[in-house]
Image: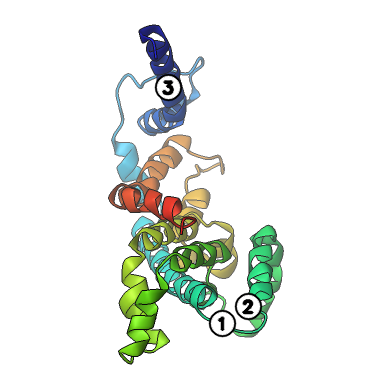
């Protein structure tokens, strides 16, 4: 690789990085603008006097703390139950034998082609008849149902574990439940990290589900932010929306920073035997 080619590659990569970071920069600088600067044209690239009070106003304008607790509770329930149920089902598809197992696995994967929004209204009617609306039980049920994509990841990872480990455990008197908890699950931290990040971000960023199943008093942070930052005329306060959005993405960024290595390795090893 010549030096000129290397420099050209660096320039292209730098341009791509700047293009990827530009929405984040625009979000941050918008969160520091005053209402007058928000209405100015042409728009300013950085506020003349950054207004950090927008962040405190974003917290006080809505039930930020209560909505944050609801979001964290739902994300924790969904992440924990989805990861455990997907791992257990993936273990069954990878290591157990039963009639029709391959056909069931194909049916499971085919459900990935069905958008979740299609089944949302029938699901709401079912939970409404069971008196589970405005509770956390829908997320418990969804978590216990697992995720087809995560089941596939766990199945691929568990299928690559040597069968000798399983046979040695059976000789020592360990059943399949013990094999799962003591041998397979402790070795699957890369896939667990991927499952935790995907499940958490999915539950954390969900807007339609909480808007349908929870009341305004017990809703999540996503719904509270989308409906609470308005002025007396009902127009959105975009600087407060941006400030709330900056705080909203912080938990996901922190989670990904701590688990990014295992997250990447989970995808790179789940398809390799």
Which of labels 1 and 3 is toward the front?
1
Residue marked by disc 3: 13
Res. 128 mark: none
CB within 8 Å, label 1 to label 3: no
Q: Decide: few, some or many residues near mark 2? Use Cα within 10 Å; few <14, some 14-19, many ≥20.
A: some
SS assignment at label 2: helix
Secondary structure under badge 3?
helix
Query: From the viewer's perspective, is 227 left or right of 266?
Result: right
Q: Residue at x 38, y 34 (%)?
A: 31
Question: Secondary structure beneath disc 1?
Answer: loop
Q: Quadrant of residue 52?
A: top left
Q: Considering depth in this image, is 163 or 252 the residue closer to the camera? A: 163
Q: Are marks 1 and 2 in contact (CB under 8 Å)?
A: yes
| 225 and 136: which is toward the camera | 136
| Residue pointed to by mark 1 | 97
Q: Nearer the viewer, residue 152 or 134?
A: 152
Residue 138 picture location, percent across and down: 54, 75
Mark 1 and mark 3: Cα distance apart in space: 48 Å
First in residue order: circle 1 vs circle 3 = 3
Residue placed under numbered mark 2 in the picture: 101
Left or right, 123 with reference to 1 = right
Q: Position of residue 15 (x, y in %)?
A: 44, 19
Q: Nearer the viewer, mark 3 or mark 2?
A: 2
């Amino acid at each position: 690789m010549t030096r000129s080619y290397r420099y050209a590659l660096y320039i292209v990569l730098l341009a791509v990085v700047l293009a990827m970071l530009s929405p984040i920069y625009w979000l941050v600088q918008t969160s520091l603008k005053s209402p007058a600067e928000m209405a100015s044209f042409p728009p300013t690239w950085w506020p003349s006097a950054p207004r950090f009070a927008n962040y405190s106003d974003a917290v006080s304008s809505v039930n930020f703390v209560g909505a944050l607790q609801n979001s964290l509770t739902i994300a924790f329930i969904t992440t924990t139950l989805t990861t455990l149920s997907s791992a257990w089902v993936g273990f069954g598809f990878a290591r157990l034998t039963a009639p029709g197992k391959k056909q069931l696995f194909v049916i499971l994967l085919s459900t990935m082609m069905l958008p979740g929004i299609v089944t949302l209204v029938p699901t709401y009617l079912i939970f409404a008849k069971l008196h589970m609306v405005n509770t956390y039980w829908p997320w418990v049920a969804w978590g216990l149902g697992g995720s087809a994509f995560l089941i596939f990841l766990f199945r691929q990872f568990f299928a690559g574990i040597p069968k000798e480990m399983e046979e040695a455990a059976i000789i020592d008197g360990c059943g399949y439940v013990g094999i799962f908890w003591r041998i397979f699950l402790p070795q699957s931290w890369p896939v667990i990290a991927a499952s935790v990040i995907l499940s958490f971000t999915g539950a954390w960023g969900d807007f339609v589900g909480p808007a349908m199943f929870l009341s305004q008093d017990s809703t999540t942070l996503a719904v509270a932010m989308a409906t609470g930052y308005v002025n007396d005329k009902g127009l959105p306060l975009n600087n407060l929306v941006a400030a709330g959005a900056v705080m909203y993405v912080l938990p996901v960024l922190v989670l990904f920073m701590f688990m990014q290595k295992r997250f990447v390795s989970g995808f790179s090893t789940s398809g390799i035997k």
